Image: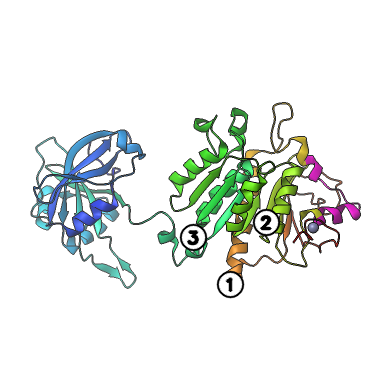
Amino acid sequence: MSGEDWIVLLPREAKELVERGHGWGQLTCRISGPDRAALVVALSNEDSDRVPVATDPGHFLMTADFQPVGHWYAAPGELALAEYFLVRQSRELSFDEFQKFVPKAERPAVGKWSIAVTYCAEPPAISDDETLPAWSAWSVTDSAVRPIHFDMREGKELVDALDGLWPARALSSKRVLLFGAGSIGGAAAESLASYGAGEIDVVDPDRLLFHNIPRHVLTTKYVGMKKVDALARTLGEAWPECQVTPWGIDLVTHANLVRPLLDKADIVVCTVDGVEARRVANYLARRARKPIVFACVLGDGGYGEILRIRPLPEVGCLECQRRRLQEAERIDLEPTLDRGYGTGTRHNPMTAVGGDLHLMGQLTAKITVATLLRAQGELDQTIVDDNLVIALRPTPGYSDPFDTTRVLDQKWYRAGRPYDDCPACNAT
Ligand SMILES: [Zn+2]
């Protein structure tokens, strides 16, 4: 069982018990030989009874064998230094050498193997900016003691880890209303959570079906469940600091239920397909004076388009932007949304591929987050223009703004002014 490529995982609660403990104790682990991995699930303080420590119930080792396999020991800083050189020189200590650092170390019987986790309260520094790790793990036999891999759950999953590197804390108070939990919406939701958005309300009446799977962030284990419920579960596991609330309702027929969500939202993201649903989202967001980001894939999967409409007097709504395209006698690909390319019915399969849809979802999340952060004063998140067309599988011969002919060509353009007679823009 002994070997250098084992890993020992320590839950946060175990770390705290060791730090407050009396110098040594026993460990119980869940161990998988094929994965060469051990998860500490209980420990004692000296020879007290072992107490269980909180672990992630979904962790893959939680179904592995349960074994009393080792000990933890407080250790002097010299052991951290010894480990540093042992790892670099691929060497090991004899058990007697190890015991000089750790007098309490218990020698396994001949032919037996155990794990040791050591903790140095004051690990030495090896340079001005590098202190050695306080924690180490060891594979222990009666003859040899070798360093093995070690990892520890230090803190929370997101905000704590990113604090100071990314303004996750500013985003943790933001609430996003997301229309559509399809391929683009699902990818957008995942990205929003990973950026640190505090709350996402997701509105979509559809269930996940088998034919959705090749394009969706959700997996077959959720087929048959409403997409919003499956997303809430998936994101709840992956990003527990993001509160995802599922609303399995239709935006068009339940606008009365959607309005209160709009009032609470800081920004709206619309990834639904179909001209009617986009029109309703446009109207509701405009009336609530909330910024809205529309995302879709148009023209048989050829182009991705993101339209950001800010609630400013000089910016026209989605309808106004479309009308301007039509009046300029330019091609308007919006009606292709109603041909089922987005919904992917069996009779009219969606032509966009999963990766392209996820890319659009992630770009949509980035634009949404940048809009929120810019409003908080983060100047490096400024987006000058509002609207983006990006070529995914471009068709030659289309007119501006769909005249980008090489894959990933991008066109940014400014949202035009509202029309005086636009019902949405003049509804307030
Ligand atoms: Zn308008």
- Name the foreground residue: 341 vs 265: 265
Q: Which residue is mark 1?
A: 377
* Residue type indicated by callout 2: Ile
Q: Quadrant of the N terminus?
A: top left
Judge the density around disc 2: few (<14), some (14-19), many (≥20) Cα neighbours within 10 Å. Answer: many
Ligand 1's image quarter is bottom right
What residue lies at 78% left-to-right and 36% top-to-bottom?
339
Question: Residue 123 placed where, x, y %?
Answer: 23, 64
Which badge, 3 or 1, comes first in the chain's sequence?
A: 3
Q: Which residue is mark 2?
A: 292
Q: Quick check: 144 left or right of 237?
A: left
Range of magenta residues: 320-336
* Residue type indicated by callout 3: Ser
Q: Quick check: 347 left or right of 135?
A: right
What residue lies at 8% left-to-right and 55% top-to-bottom?
103
Question: Callout 3: helix, strand or loop?
Answer: loop
Question: Residue 309 placed where, x, y %?
Answer: 72, 59
Q: Which residue is mark 3?
A: 172
